[in-house]
Amino acid sequence: MGVACLLWLGCNGSSRDAPSRAELRGQRPLEMLVATDAETFDPRYATDAVAVRVTRLIHAGLVRLDPDTLEPVPYLARGWTWLDARTLRVELREGIRFHSGTPLTAEDVRATLRAFASQAVGSRHARVVDAIGDIDILTPHLLVIHLLRPHATLLTDLELPILRADEATGAPRPEGSLDGLGPFVIARRSAGSVELAPASGALSLPRRGVTLTTVHDENARALRMHAGRADIVVNGFSPTLLPAFEGAHGVHINTRHGANLTYLLARTDRGALRDPRLRRAIATAIDRPRITSTLLAGRARPATTVLPPQHWAHTHATEWAFDPSSARDAITKAYGHRLHLTLLTSTDRLRGTIARFLAQELSEVGIEVDVVPLELGTLIGRLSAGDFELATLQLPEITEPNVLRVFLHSSNIPPLGANRGRVQDAQVDRLLDEGAETLDADARKLIYAALERRIRDEALFIPLWHEDHVAVVSERAQTFVPSADGRWLSLAGLPFSH
């Protein structure tokens, strides 16, 4: 059914000469500042952004995602072939070893996938492998995965870190001591600091170590960068603060368009917002270019659809017209009076400013909006309980379009999922089901194009913008750029400093 994938060399840098141990010892580690500590470094349980990004430096999967398009490409796997809609044949690269020196085999893959699915292990990522049934091992480097049902996202799902077979079902290792296959290993941990050292046996041997230092305060991070005491900060500064780094001696700003979506969520099953005419009027009352060019300092792109433009499944659409006059007329004809709604947002200063600007724009078309800032836990609790009318939210990593199923399919209304807008649309359900079961990439793209048209026509989500990933870096790290999903894999390919 499918054609075997070709070996991909772009991510692992295997074409360059590996640095010697003496050279590595002479390299001072890069210092990377993060705003929060990771909850755990065990990939079976890591869910927060820092934890996920660090575990992908320590561990590796059968695939990695292209840093721009997020298409799955071979990594530990040499390639694969779809034998039919429920059967995937996977060939592993030979000569790959864990950090301990233990060779990677097909048994490690089988044990890992079973561990992620095991109730006894209790992985927070069990849903990712719930379509996998039997796994046959043909040779130490060849296996066949049998699915319980057609599951088009399997290749993206195989980005999950592969663990050593004898450790896969063991007790949690929050300190990060599980044997890995990634370019780094945790060398030392202390309060607010994690030292990553280059790992032997990896597909690529980094040319220097990295120290992650937690600095909660934005101004403190800025002072450390200006003083030359740090090398990398990713998405750690408000857009309006970034101009202070432009032209600063020894400091660079690197960006990549992000595979994320900031959007306005409406409760679609009750009240005035049940009417798609009102939701469409709100969509046209928002001046996206003005917000992205001012409050976001040009570090975001107005969204035309849910999927970002560089995503492999994106389909071009015209920009949402900013037409407050038409929005005002539509609201007047539908309701004949001014409406009053509440808008939930986070307590983040920038998000609060944006929410108040949105409220001002909606006020100009006849909707009075009360902005309610909430801590994240309280915000999610109210959304899940349905105690809201409008909310500003972000999907931080749209790596696979099937993630929209969690937020839009009628089977995922809370408490069963995250369809917090209570969308119940038979056409949306059908398209999401087809997208999850169709293997052909071109056919899937057509399905998701139809889905995006339906979302847009009914304003089930109101897309606002896609924010860039912004790295402020020193001379020593000037080539570092995060990937479209915000991950840090390019740390492994940075050149020597001078």
Image: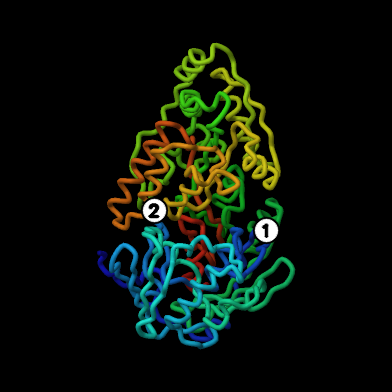
Q: Is residue 123 visible?
A: yes
Name the front one of labels 2 and 1: 2
Report the residue at 54% width, 27% height from top.
273
Per the image, label 1 sits on a secondary structure element best described as loop
Give the image location of residue 170, x and y in percent: 61, 78
The image quadrant of residue 82 is bottom left
Q: In the picture provided, is 425 more to the left or to the right than 85? A: right
Tell which circle, 2 or 1, labels the residue nearer the N-terminal end.
1
Q: For mark 2, what is the residue?
A: 436
Q: Which of the two residues, 105 or 67, is positioned nearer the viewer here?
A: 105
Residue 36: which numbered mark, if any? 1
Residue 193: which numbered mark, if any? none
Q: In the picture provided, is 377 more to the left or to the right than 418? A: right
Give the image location of residue 181, x and y in percent: 50, 77
Q: CA distance from mark 2 to mark 1?
A: 34 Å
Number of callouts: 2
The residue under label 1 is which amino acid type?
Answer: Thr
Residue 428 sits above or below residue 37 on the image: above
Report the residue at 36% width, 85% height from top.
139
The residue under label 2 is which amino acid type?
Answer: Ala
Give the image location of residue 339, x and y in percent: 60, 19
Q: Which of the two residues, 156 or 131, is positioned nearer the viewer here?
A: 131
Report the residue at 62% width, 76% height from top.
186
Residue 122 sits above or below residue 322 on the image: below
Farthest residue in the right direction? Answer: 191
